[in-house]
């Protein structure tokens, strides 16, 4: 999916490679045990589901990834980050829109098709869905998520 987006949006190879690295790295620790997650993401508070991003980023860094945008994309892919460059935005959307999830498959496929023409609009739709899910979980909203949300929906007043 990210390959198709990169092609449709005409991004240079170097940028496409950043997107692909983020996608490749982001779930490296998704199936890790909670001991491993705590070891790699000891300073990240919150439920264990929110630790695999920071843990995957720590591991990517240990294995030589130096691109700050790629590391921030991986680290915050479950939360969002106001300061993200395009890599973070692409990963946040791709992670949610990736085929294979059953719920709202048609809607997701449509959003994935629209991403190259309207990445900002699709990013806001994905944020609405993902933040709604976080709210429904009953956990307090992490601070990076609040700032990310406000950066997407800030209105000139
Ligand atoms: Fe993930």
Image: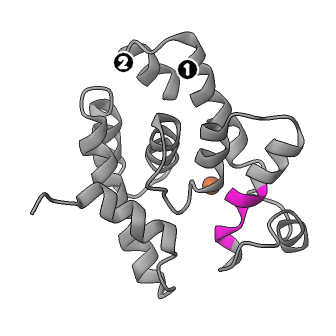
Secondary structure under tag 1 reads helix
Q: Image point 56% across, 54% down: which residue? A: 77
Which image quadrant for residue 42? bottom right
Decide which of tag 2 and tag 1 comes sooner along the chain: 2
Alpha carbon distance from label 2 to label 1: 10 Å
Residue furthest out toward the front: 157
Which image quadrant for residue 111? top left
Percent position (x, y) of residue 62? 88, 44
Which image quadrant for residue 52? bottom right
Looking at the image, which is closer to me, 77 or 83?
Answer: 83
Residue furthest out toward the left: 157
Percent position (x, y) of residue 46? 65, 80
Q: Image point 76% across, 52% down: which residue? A: 56
Percent position (x, y) of residue 69? 60, 39
Position of 50 relative to 1 (above/below): below
Residue 110 visible in rendering: yes
Q: Which residues are magenta?
A: 49-55
Residue under numbered circle 2: 9
Figure quadrant of the C terminus: bottom left
Residue 134 is left or right of residue 52, and the answer is left
Looking at the image, which is closer to me, 96 or 154?
Answer: 154
Residue 105 is left or right of residue 83, and the answer is left
Mark 2 and mark 1 residues within 8 Å of each other at the beta carbon: no
Residue under numbered circle 1: 16
Main SS type for the magenta part? helix
Position of 10 relative to 57 (above/below): above
């Amino acid at each position: 999916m990210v390959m198709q987006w990169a092609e449709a949006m005409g991004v240079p190879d170097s940028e496409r490679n950043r997107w692909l690295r983020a996608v490749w790295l982001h779930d490296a620790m998704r199936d890790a045990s909670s001991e491993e997650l705590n070891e790699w993401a000891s300073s990240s508070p919150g439920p264990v589901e929110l630790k695999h991003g920071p843990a995957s980023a720590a591991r990517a860094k240990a294995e030589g990834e130096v691109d700050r945008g790629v590391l921030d994309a991986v680290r915050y892919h479950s939360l969002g980050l106001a300061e993200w460059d395009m890599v973070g935005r692409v990963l946040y959307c791709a992670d949610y829109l990736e085929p294979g999830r059953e719920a709202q498959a048609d809607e997701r496929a449509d959003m994935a098709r629209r991403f190259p023409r309207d990445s900002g609009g699709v990013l806001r739709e994905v944020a609405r869905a993902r933040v709604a899910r976080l709210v429904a979980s009953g956990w307090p909203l992490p601070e990076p998520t609040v700032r990310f949300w406000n950066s997407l929906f800030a209105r000139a007043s």
